[in-house]
Amino acid sequence: MKCTRALLSLALVLAFAGPVAGQAVPLDLQQVLPGPVTVSEADDEVTVTWPDESGRDWHATFSLDPSRPLIRSITAGEQVVIQDARPFYESETGVRTGGWNAFFDYPPRHPDGTRHSKGVFRLRSATVRTIGDRVELLFDGLSMGVFEGAIAYTFFPGSRLIQQEAVVTTDENDVAYYYDAGWEMGARADRKVGGNMTTTIAYYDTTGEIEHVVSTGFDPERIPAEVRYRTLAAATSGGSVAVFPAPHQYFFPRDFTSNIGYLWHRSWRGRVSLGIRQIRDTNWQFYPWMNAPPGQTQRMSVFFLLSDGAPDSALHDVLRYTNRDRFRALEGYKTLSTHWHLAYTMQAMEHGVDWTPPFKPVLKAMGVDASVIMDFHGDGHPRDLTELRLEELDAYFNALRAQSDEDFLLIPAEEANVHFGGHWVLMFPKPVYWFMNRPPGGAFETTHPEYGQVYSTADATELLELVRREGGFMYQTHPRTKGSTGYPDAIM
């Protein structure tokens, strides 16, 4: 009887332990359709074959054996570019206390702080499916703190681009998070006597010039790099690979946008890593974290671009996808950027209207044709009811006119935030002089000897009349969050 119980217990342990070393996990190919990206299975491995932009075939081979690196190799023809690579993920999670849309709900401020978790991948199964002309491989077995799920790879025909995603969910409430992602690859050829490394890393520095560094392996920790164009590349024995994040899924609007090193690399004892990262707490500004409602799938994405050439080649090719982080011109349209609090007028009053503000060449280099400037937001005297207010408005109009030309327009606006509720912005098609309230003894409309017609809005009714009379345009800024929490719903 004891023997029978022991055998039964052993059988149950084996049944729930999942795949063991040397045992291939199940592979589901039922959702694969004929197309430019093909999938084959052999010797406990699954291989994806797809053409790049020149028609050359690339092959990515994944192991179905949990004891081996997930990415066995990626080759250009017979040339091995990547070998023995593993996905890298880490997360920082915190607790929301102000709801999903509270900009100033800052997780590190929570009494319980935040939690840092390393991603642990133990392969359990694999599924492949065709999505249009692309193919996605989903490898179940990722655990990362409060998150559980899988690693996905998407291949794009006509491209050397690969998208990696952590496809995960959480059952916990009020989760906010950041994530770091990347690859850790085998690099035996870079390892020298004594365990030192000689891995070539390349990136565009903040001026846009390519910089090369040799990662020696003396730093076992990840080394951040302040780069331009949000990409970094590493040389491999058969080529190179560049990494970069998705722009609008990784970088959120911030009050101040500073380059604090979102790319990283590491070279250590025969392994090379590269990837992207977020900074959980800079002990300065409030930064909006990502939301993870219970049961809602999160896709933590990162892109890799392969090359059979040097890292410089990979970096250059990335710019085809990111367009150098510049707005692409569209025929018949102008590119407009909005909501800039630059305190420009007060500086122009000090330096003179011919002084070129530092933001102007930056906006033009980004492909911006026109920009809405919102001065007097913490600067100047917007609520003043005397000549000072009118003088600053006049300086505002003159300064922006001086910095505008037929190819670049600066539009004066104000985030006035009076009378209507919430935060909102107002702009006019011509210079309009107005007070945000009624001066003592004043009237809604008066005539000024220098500025002409001047309005004084005592309430919402008068403000709306001003907007209608002068053909103004107004809209709710950052609706339902920050200073517009509850708006425009409260007035609709």
Image: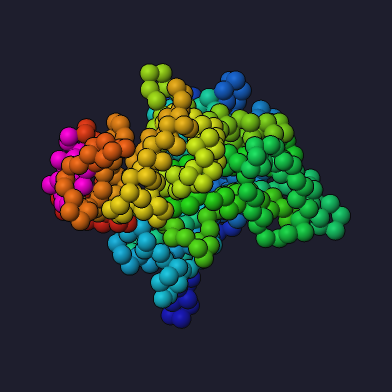
The residue located at (60%, 20%) in the rendering is 54
Q: Is residue 293 left or right of residue 13?
A: left
**Which residue is most to the front?**
449
The answer to which of 342 and 130 lies nearer the viewer is 342
Q: Which residues are magenta?
A: 455-469
Tell me if residue 327 can be seen. Answer: no
Q: Position of residue 201 (x, y in %)?
A: 71, 44
Q: Where does residue 204 sit, x and y in percent of width and height?
A: 66, 39
Q: Position of residue 456 (x, y in %)?
A: 21, 47
Give the residue displayed 65% in from the left and 39% down from the top. 207
Question: Is 352 displayed left or right of 443 in the figure?
Answer: right
Chosen colour scheme: rainbow
User: Does 305 sit above or below residue 463?
Assistant: above
Q: Is residue 51 above or below residue 190?
A: above
Q: How many labels were placed on the picture?
A: 0
Q: Residue furthest top?
A: 331
Q: Quadrant of the N terminus?
A: bottom left
Residue 208 in sight = yes
In the image: residue 54, left or right of residue 98:
right
Q: Is residue 464 magenta?
A: yes
Q: Quadrant of residue 101?
A: bottom left
